[in-house]
């Protein structure tokens, strides 16, 4: 095995990416005698948005042995069963649909859903709207928590909503307790060895910090990998137009939904994320089609708070990814490696993937150029795979009410080859699950997600094009499925009450 070429790691950046990286690396390597230092600028704040996750965040906390009862109250966190999409499609009956996280019970209902969809694509008049097939959508709709009692042995997978700033503080506390050294300093110069490897960082106080390996978590600035090592940035702006956001909080009512709501607006979409003490809201839009002031006005109008004196935050977003995430002795993690607009809340998932996969290579002592290339290809696959799923929301939209939507739906030529094949397979009624496997895209988004988005948006033969199903096609009883899922849902408790058991003071 090659010699592991490092003993001292410096992470630059104290946002969520920096602290998540620190925790994973500390757990893996401090016991092996490494030192891990996290340096953050006292001048440049963290981005402080990003309040939704995928179920992967649960795995992150579970792997660190951090219980929900500990971290959730400290971060005003709630459970998330999936995302409800509103007004992305204008096709009758498809104005909204829910993209659920998976559940053990899907083993019963998913085959029915997939069977009906495939038959519908062949012209059979069968029920295909995804919301009726998944327990997660029912739990979310009824403001329940996705925590099954022990007497109900079918887990529901879930993600979380959380206050991004509080999560950062929590992770920092944990990382320091695990032995990560933390200091403040604004890096003004990055020194390199003749080989091109990074050698040391010079702060505005004159401190010189050297290390064997550097982790760039400097956010959109991309100080080490992009600015110093000149790694090219590949923009996704040819088919993802949104590059700005405006965010503001509103009050949360008595009920706490276990879902993110994403509502398509005139020049993008608005998120609504329930925390225990407030809703986080924001409008992700394209500055090529809409001014900052117009976006803020539209968001306030959408929320019914035109006259309320609530301060907003305006943000710019750089959408795309770096060409390589690991270059020489530097790994970029978080916004510094790339960002895909937050429609499916995937950024922290990509942080986790990057650090976890890097840790695999590291543990095996794999530090050759070939290993680096292999790693970069894997991470690029994840970024491009997530991008394709996000792009599908726009390409399947039937909105044409503004220039923004017309541009989004018209611009077909920028779809990746995999997506062209997948859409074509769908239109031909081929077995989509088999296509997802054949195209090797299941590890980015699995087949059920593709069935949900395409049938949820109503990319199906319409009422005039369908025929009576054959007996073989109509082999499932939807009323029986409804009754089965209704009874299963009775096992779940009110979301707010479950969160209150953690002992947090929850504002109403
Ligand atoms: C509008 C919007 C919505 C989002 N929604 C979601 C979501 O729902 N789910 C999700 O998973 N993600 C979401 N994200 C992404 C998420 O916010 C980020 O991935 C996450 O916060 C990680 O950010 P970061 O740590 O990479 O960068 P930042 O939080 O920007 O941290 C950068 C750090 O670098 C430090 N730094 C910068 N320059 C220097 C320097 N010269 N010297 C020393 N230190 C320096 C700063 O001090 C700071 O500590 C969203 C992002 C945006 C813009």
Image: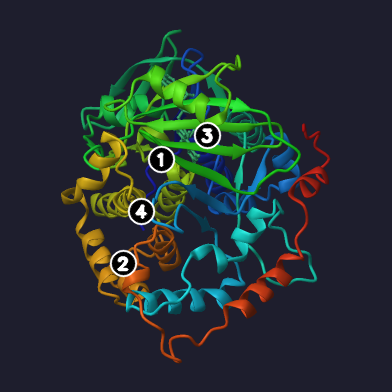
Residue occupied by mark 3: 16
Q: Nearer the viewer, mark 3 or mark 2?
A: 2
Cβ at disc 3 under 8 Å from ligand 1: yes
Q: Nearer the viewer, mark 4 or mark 2?
A: 4
Q: Nearer the viewer, mark 1 or mark 3?
A: 3
Upstream in the sequence, badge 1 or badge 2? 1
Q: CA distance from mark 1 to mark 2?
A: 34 Å
Name the residue at 21% across, 32% down: 195
Q: Check the image and report above or below for 298 versus 124.
A: above
Label 2: few (<14), some or many (≥20) within 10 Å? some
Upstream in the sequence, badge 1 or badge 3? 1
Q: Secondary structure at mark 3?
A: helix
Residue occupied by mark 1: 6
Residue occupied by mark 2: 440
**Residue 243 in the figure: left or right of residue 482:** left
- Of residue 401 and residue 156, the one placed in the foreground of this image is 401
Mark 4 in CB contact with mark 2 (< 8 angstroms)? no
Q: Secondary structure at mark 2?
A: loop
| x then y, percent, for residue 261 | 54, 44
Q: Secondary structure at mark 1?
A: loop
Q: CA distance from mark 1 to mark 3?
A: 24 Å
Q: Is residue 38 visible?
A: no
| x then y, percent, for residue 379 | 34, 50
Residue occupied by mark 4: 389
**Residue 97 in the figure: left or right of residue 383:** right
Q: CA distance from mark 4 to mark 1?
A: 37 Å
């Amino acid at each position: 095995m090659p010699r592991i070429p490092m003993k001292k790691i410096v992470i630059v950046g104290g946002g969520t990416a920096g602290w998540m990286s620190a925790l994973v690396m500390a757990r893996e390597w401090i016991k092996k005698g490494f030192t891990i230092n996290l340096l953050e600028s006292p001048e440049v704040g963290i981005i402080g948005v990003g309040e939704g996750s995928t179920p992967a965040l649960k795995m992150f906390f579970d792997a660190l042995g951090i219980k929900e009862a500990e971290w959730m109250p400290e971060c005003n966190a709630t459970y998330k069963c999936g995302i409800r999409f509103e007004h992305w499609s204008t096709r009758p009956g498809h104005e909204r649909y829910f993209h659920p996280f998976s559940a053990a019970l899907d083993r019963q209902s998913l085959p029915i859903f997939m069977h009906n969809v495939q038959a519908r694509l062949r012209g059979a008049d069968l029920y295909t709207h995804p919301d009726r097939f998944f327990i997660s959508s029912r739990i979310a709709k009824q403001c329940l928590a996705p925590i099954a009692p022990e007497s109900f042995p079918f887990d529901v997978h879930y993600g979380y909503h959380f206050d991004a700033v509080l999560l950062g503080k929590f992770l920092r506390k944990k990382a320091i307790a695990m032995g990560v050294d933390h200091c403040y300093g604004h890096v003004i110069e990055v020194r390199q060895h003749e080989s091109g490897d990074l050698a040391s960082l010079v702060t505005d106080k004159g401190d010189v910090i050297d290390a064997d390996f550097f982790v760039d978590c400097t956010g959109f600035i991309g100080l080490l990998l992009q600015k110093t090592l000149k790694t090219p940035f590949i923009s996704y702006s040819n088919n993802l137009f949104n590059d700005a956001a405006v965010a503001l909080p509103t009050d949360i009512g008595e009920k706490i939904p276990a879902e993110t709501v994403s509502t398509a607006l005139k020049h993008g979409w608005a998120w609504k994320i329930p925390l225990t003490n407030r809703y986080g809201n924001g409008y992700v839009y394209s500055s090529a089609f809409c001014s900052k002031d117009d976006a803020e006005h539209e968001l306030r109008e959408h929320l019914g708070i035109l006259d309320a004196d609530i301060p907003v935050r305006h943000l710019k977003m750089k959408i795309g990814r770096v060409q390589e995430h690991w270059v020489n002795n530097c790994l970029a993690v978080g916004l510094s490696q790339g960002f895909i607009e937050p429609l499916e809340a995937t950024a922290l998932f990509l942080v986790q993937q990057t650090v976890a996969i890097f840790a695999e290579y590291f543990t095996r002592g794999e530090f050759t150029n070939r290993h680096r290339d292999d790693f970069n290809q894997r991470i690029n696959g994840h970024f491009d795979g997530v991008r394709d799923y996000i792009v599908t929301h726009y390409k399947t939209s039937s909105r044409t009410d503004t220039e923004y939507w017309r541009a989004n739906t018209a611009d077909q030529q920028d779809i990746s080859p995999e997506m062209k094949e997948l859409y074509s397979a769908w239109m031909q009624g081929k077995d989509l699950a088999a296509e997802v496997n054949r195209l090797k895209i299941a590890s980015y988004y699995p087949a059920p997600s593709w069935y949900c988005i395409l049938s949820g948006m109503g990319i199906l033969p319409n009422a005039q094009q369908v025929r009576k199903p054959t007996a073989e096609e109509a082999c499932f009883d939807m009323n029986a499925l409804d009754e089965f899922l209704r009874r299963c849902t009775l096992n779940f408790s009110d979301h707010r009450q479950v969160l209150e058991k953690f002992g947090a003071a929850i504002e109403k």
